[in-house]
Image: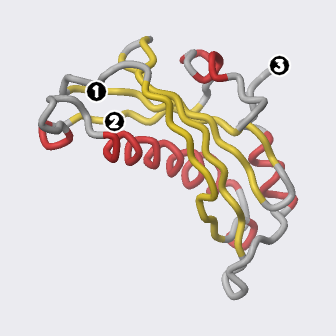
């Protein structure tokens, strides 16, 4: 995913939407660190908060539609080895015609543990194919683009 400022994704101050995550003992694998599939689930919770709490509530019900994940890249920067609380920052990176990209960072305090970039495609409920994002949804996404 060229053009992404991965250094910016690792800075907590580049996000406006945050999701607290509780690391539980069952999240740890045999090496005593959080398993990569669990890290992906933490990121999913962050995306859910942005889409369903920060954006969906301000739009008409039919302005959003359904989405599928088209691509996801996760960069693991440090091991998450402790139970306790993490914070997932989530923001919109790019808005296309039928898709948008979200950038994310997982933080332990101000230390970035992982970054991620994900592309989601808007699909029609019946066609199950990519469809143009509605203008109200595009505007709501635009409010979550990084500040210049």
Q: Residues within 10 Å of mark 3 (few under 14, many from 20)?
A: few
Calculate the distance from the C-alpha at mark 3 to the C-alpha at mark 1: 30 Å
Residues at circles 3 and 2 in contact by the CB criterion of under 8 Å: no
Residue at point 67%, 82% (across, down): 125
For disc 2, the marked residue is: 21
Residue 83 percent across, percent down from the top left: 18, 27
Q: Secondary structure at mark 2?
A: strand
Q: Which residue is mark 3?
A: 148
Residue shown at 69%/39% (left/top)?
92
- Whether 97 is drawn above or below 37: the answer is below
Image quarter (top left, top right, bottom left or bottom right) of the C terminus:
top right
Occupied quadrant, residue 64: bottom right
Q: CA distance from mark 2 to mark 1?
A: 6 Å
Residue 37: assigned label:
none
The residue carrying pointer 1 sits among few (fewer than 14), some (14 to 19) or many (20 or more) residues within 10 Å by Cα, namely few
- Kindly identify the residue that appears in the image at 36 percent across and 39 percent down: 39
Measured from the top left, where is residue 66 in percent x and y? 64, 70
For the residue pair 28 and 141, the one nearer the viewer reads as 28
On the question of residue 106 being in view, the answer is: no
Q: Quadrant of the N terminus?
A: top right
């Amino acid at each position: 995913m060229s053009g992404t400022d991965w250094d910016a994704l690792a800075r907590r101050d580049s996000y406006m939407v945050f999701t607290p995550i509780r690391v539980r003992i069952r999240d740890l694998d045999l090496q005593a660190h959080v398993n990569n599939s669990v890290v992906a689930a933490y990121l999913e919770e962050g995306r859910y908060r942005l889409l369903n709490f920060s954006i969906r509530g301000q739009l008409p019900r039919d302005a959003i539609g359904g989405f599928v994940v088209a691509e996801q890249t996760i960069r693991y920067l440090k091991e998450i080895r402790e139970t306790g609380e993490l914070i997932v920052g989530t923001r919109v990176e790019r808005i296309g015609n039928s898709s948008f990209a979200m950038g994310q960072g997982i933080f332990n305090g101000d230390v970035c543990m992982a970054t991620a970039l994900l592309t989601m495609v808007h699909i029609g409920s019946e066609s199950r194919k990519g469809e143009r994002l509605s203008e109200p949804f595009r505007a709501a996404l635009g409010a979550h683009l990084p500040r210049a």
